[in-house]
Image: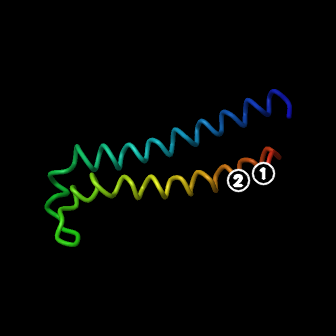
Amino acid sequence: MTPENRAAYWKANVRLLFILLFFWFIVSYGLGIILVEPLNSIQIGGYPLGFWFAQQGSIYVFLVLIFIYAAAMNRLDKKFDVDE
């Protein structure tokens, strides 16, 4: 792998990480803390939606983001011909 390809691969990897972490931040901090009051007016299973996002939602989103990251990295590995 040439140094230019390594740099492009790393840049794409870091960009993907920042995008996924941004979405996780929005869900965990934005919906779980900042917007908790408006979300609490909606009930899911008897619990306020704001509570659900603060306690469970960010964990579920994190798990989904792990699978998205794995799939995206597989595509990126194939693109740069470093797949297994």
Q: CA distance from mark 2 to mark 1?
A: 6 Å
Q: Which sits in the foreground, 3 or 64? A: 64
Q: Which residue is mark 2?
A: 74
Q: Do the residues under discs 2 and 1 have CB atoms within 8 angstroms?
A: yes
Q: Residue furthest top?
A: 3
Q: Residue furthest right?
A: 1
Residue type highlighted by circle 2: Asn
* Residue for point 36% across, 52% down: 58
Q: Secondary structure at mark 2?
A: helix
The dot on residue 78 is 1
Q: Position of residue 53 (x, y in %)?
A: 28, 56
CA neighbours of label 1 inside 10 A, class few (<14), some (14 to 19), many (20+): few
* Residue for point 17% across, 71% down: 46
* Residue for point 26% across, 59% down: 52
In this rendering, the answer to whether 43 lies above or below 40 is below
Residue type highlighted by circle 1: Lys
In this rendering, the answer to whether 3 lies above or below 47 is above
* Total labels drawn: 2
**Side of 26 where 83 appears, left or right:** right
What is the quadrant of residue 26 in the picture? top left
Q: Position of residue 44 (x, y in %)?
A: 22, 69
In this rendering, the answer to whether 52 lies above or below 11 is below
CA neighbours of label 2 inside 10 A, class few (<14), some (14 to 19), many (20+): some
Q: Position of residue 73 (x, y in %)?
A: 67, 49
Q: Position of residue 25 (x, y in %)?
A: 38, 43
